[in-house]
Amino acid sequence: MVQRIPALDGVRGVAVLWVMIYHFTFYVRSDVVALDLVYRWFRAGDRGVDLFFVLSGFLITGILLKAKERAPAIKPYLTNFYWRRTLRIFPLYYLTLAVFLLGVIWFVTPKESLKDNQWMLWAYVSNMGLAFIDSRLFDDGPIRLLHFWSLAIEEQFYVVWPLVVWFLPRRVLIGLCLMGGVFSAVVWYFLVAKGLSAAPWYFTLCRVDGLCVGAAMAALMPAASEKAWLRKTLGAVAIGGLAVLAFSVVVDVNNVFSGPAVGMFAIRQAVSHAGELGMAAAVGIVALGGAAWADRLLSSAPLTFFGKYSYGLYVWHYAVVMQLSFAYFTPGKLSGMLTVPGALIASCAIGIGLSVVLALLSYHLFEDWFLRLKDARPKNATVGEAQPPVVAGEAAFSPIPAIEATPERRPTGGAA
């Protein structure tokens, strides 16, 4: 059953707004305590990527589980998924690479390391280059494609996860997801202990925790829709996890507990995982319609708008608008004309506004041509299969049983 849950579009909107605000305000600080608390939320905008991963794991797993129930065999199950995923993700991704790696390169001479390793971008493994070669590898003057690391991890997930979901029973899948979260923390610590402090931020095995907790939440949804105690448990986890996340931002946990020592690492990872669990549980509660006030807020027109165009916003805000920001409207450049808060607001408003214009043009003049092909089913697809969503907002199968769902609600599909 295809369902639209606007509130999940709103969750995606929150994620992309948080990331953009983070990039357009880069580490602004204030001696005024109240203002600095606000700025810490800006500086925590990288957690918006974690939210993208959680939401992606939740939605993709829900889609695949529903498709598995309906598909007569693995071939149409995989064909339909990859057909729709390719049409949504590849066109904008490879257009951007063509513009910057084949177009801009004619006018500038990028550093040799970028030229030698650009194949990683084309092959969706740029995150590996950032992890083990140079954490600024794909940022060089007018070529700013570092943010494609998260899209690379998402694509790697899309390649592997459909097979995992097809072959594993639901309960085993939940167990695997929980083990994946623990495994990612172990790998993260191993790399830090080896002196590779930047690598875990980009290495796939260190970043699967968000995808895993989102996937586990999707697998739990049918049971949660039927059992009141499980819904209440998810609510408690959401409140607790989000409270830990808020506390970590207020006290700036990553700075207070910095360093490779085991104890420091354990605290940072515990806080990070608690925040991701809270995000995943909150997404589950929203999908179940268990919080009316949150549903109204997240279903609001502004947030669902940003959710719908989040893929283009994510791609263009860093690849193009950040260039303009550095040249003309960073908070520092605007602070001569405005107060610091005013400069921050102006910088974000200009950056987000320009990003919206580019995302709208990109979606309606380019991406939409490919989206129209999604319903032209590939040869081996069967009628009634699940329709995967993507990073920017398309219809998806709800992981919630039809008997519990309301007809106007639906999930939307991350990296973002």
Image (spheres, helix red, strand yellow):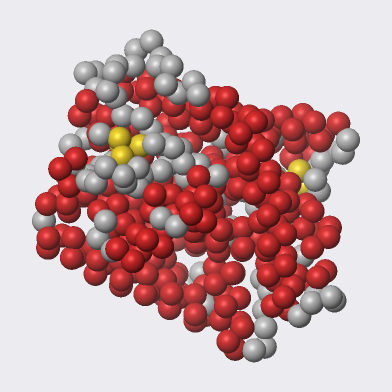
Residue 178, compared with residue 267, is above or below; it is above
Location of residue 114 in the rendering, given as x and y in whole percent from the top left corner? 74, 40
Residue displayed at 39% across by 66% down: 275
Question: Quarter-wise, where is residue 227 in the image?
Answer: bottom left
Q: Is residue 179 visible?
A: no
- The answer to which of 139 and 6 lies nearer the viewer is 6
- The answer to which of 412 and 267 lies nearer the viewer is 412
- The answer to which of 53 and 113 lies nearer the viewer is 53
Residue displayed at 38% across by 74% down: 244
Position of residue 203 in the picture relative to residue 113 (left or right): left
- The residue most toward the right is 107
Residue 60, compared with residue 317, is above or below; it is above
Location of residue 106 in the rendering, given as x and y in whole percent from the top left corner? 86, 31
The quadrant of the rendering that contains the N terminus is top left
- The answer to which of 144 and 3 lies nearer the viewer is 3
Position of residue 114 in the picture relative to residue 62 (left or right): right
Residue displayed at 44% across by 61% down: 189
Location of residue 276 in the rendering, given as x and y in whole percent from the top left corner? 38, 61
